[in-house]
Amino acid sequence: MKGALPYYTQACKLWPQFTLAQYRLAQVQTALSDFTVAQTSAEVALKLAPNTPELLRLVGVLRLEQKKSCSPSEVLNLAVKADEQDPYAWLALAISLERAACKRSPEQCNVVQKAADASSVALRLFREYGIGVPYQIANNNGVLHCELGNVFLSRAAFLSAMDECCATFPMHAGPHGKNSHQVVWLHALDLYTLWTDAHFDPALTVGERIRIERGDKTVCIVGIKDICTTNASSKFLQATHLSKEFCTSQSCVLQIKVYEKLSIAAGACTQNFVLHRLDSKKYQDEHISASIRVNLAQLHAAAGDLSVAKNLCVAAKHTDSNNIRSTLLLSSVALSTNERDEARHHLKTATSLIFERLAANSSNTALNRSVRSHLSDSLLFASNMWYELHEFQQARILLERVQALCSDSGPLSQVNACVSLCRLALRPVAGETALRPDRLKRAVNHARKALSQDCSCHSVPKSDYLLCSNVVHLLKTDSKFTVL
């Protein structure tokens, strides 16, 4: 590759309007990691042939690589319009939109939706062409859907990421090699109950995790809450809004209650799904990335399935003992179950890991932006946990450390840190009958700083924005201040 460089360089000097030479020169320079020079060559080629899909994709990817370059999304949108079947262009577009979403503007939700859509198209095209998909793509797709509140799509994406890590998704098979999947039905009037006339060997058990599919697409993973057998009489079928066509082989049907609501297509009354039994060893597979486990654990924790969330976090810790997110989530789960000592233990461990990582990267300017942003967010989460444990001094120490990192970690952490410090300053203290002037002054300063970084506080809840606004205007009015 390096040997071709002087020839393409000479060709471009002799004939600057030679589009193919400019394009090949940009490709060689990209392969040699000379991205700045490659971008210049690619931009020249694009001006000569503005509608060429390959050039649009190359320019977009180089702008994305440079990070400081403007409008990677704009040119990548043109690339996918020029060639809708290019998975690499769709993937680059998804990455550029993900970065734009991190700016936390009022249009963030729309940008996240576009990023999720682009990522989904890229995944579909990669699989259609039989191209191996790195698990990070499916994992990021799950994070985007999680940000949008699409729990089922998010969980399906994380399961897909597990598949990419493990190559196959092991199923639990019954004795004598019997299949582990059975057809079940779901009615729109009761999205917490599955019905089936199938026979399971071994029998289903309460607490077991099952995977639900429609076609070849995973819908969700749920836990079994209750199981009972019912006679499939006409009266029963009428009461449950099921029809005889669903109960052909057995006089009895199995009623499977699950913990989480299942999805069903709009307008459909009753639908068929396929139930797969999961191998409990799946979560313990050593090939699964710790980040996928933690992402899936967050979904289970949000759904109230704390035992599975804890198991996933423990498995993540086995994979990566220094994983900060899994340690923080273990602390959160412990606090939710009122195991305060265990919560403190995990929180201290997480805080130590954060400070160790900060010390290790203190002199590394190449990593400070991305690494410190992650660590600042981790410190914010930890400070909120200390606040919930009523250890306010610990919370204040961490928040002040976040402020010290804000110049490198961007406005998001700074706004949240200032809002949290404002709340701490306004916190009622035992023995005080009124808010001391020095604490009120600190609260006002923190609120002003938060609003100066983000005048509308898009990155924090509306109640926190109102809190900051009320504190700032407190000294200008005679009205009584109330902490929200």
Image (cartoon, rainbow, N blue to C red):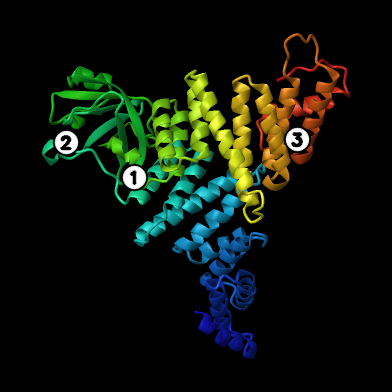
For label 3, the residue is: 450
Q: Nearer the viewer, mark 2 or mark 1?
A: 2
Specify the quadrant that holds the C terminus.
top right
Q: Reply above or below: 88 against 55.
A: above
- Viewer-closest of 456 and 327: 327
- Dividing the picture into quadrants, the one containing residue 27 is bottom right
What number is the disc on residue 217?
Answer: 1
Say which residue appears at 48% left-offset and 66% top-offset.
83
Q: Residues within 10 Å of mark 3 (few under 14, many from 20)?
A: many
Q: Nearer the viewer, mark 1 or mark 3?
A: 3
Left or right: where 17 falls relative to 440: left
Left or right: where 175 falls relative to 166: left
Q: Residues within 10 Å of mark 1 (few under 14, many from 20)?
A: few
Task: Locate residue 277, reporting x and y percent.
Answer: 26, 35
Task: Locate residue 205, reporting x and y percent.
Answer: 25, 25
Q: Reply above or below: 244 against 127.
A: above
Mark 2 or mark 1, earlier in chain: 2
Residue type for callout 2: Gly
Rounded to the nearest angstrom, the CA distance separating label 1 from label 3 is 44 Å
Left or right: where 234 falls relative to 29: left
Say which residue appears at 51% left-offset and 29% top-offset.
346
Task: Locate residue 7, reporting x and y percent.
Answer: 55, 87
Say which residue appears at 75% left-offset and 20% top-offset.
426
Q: Residues within 10 Å of mark 2 (few under 14, many from 20)?
A: some
Rounded to the nearest angstrom, the CA distance separating label 3 from label 2 is 59 Å
Left or right: where 481 falls relative to 259: right
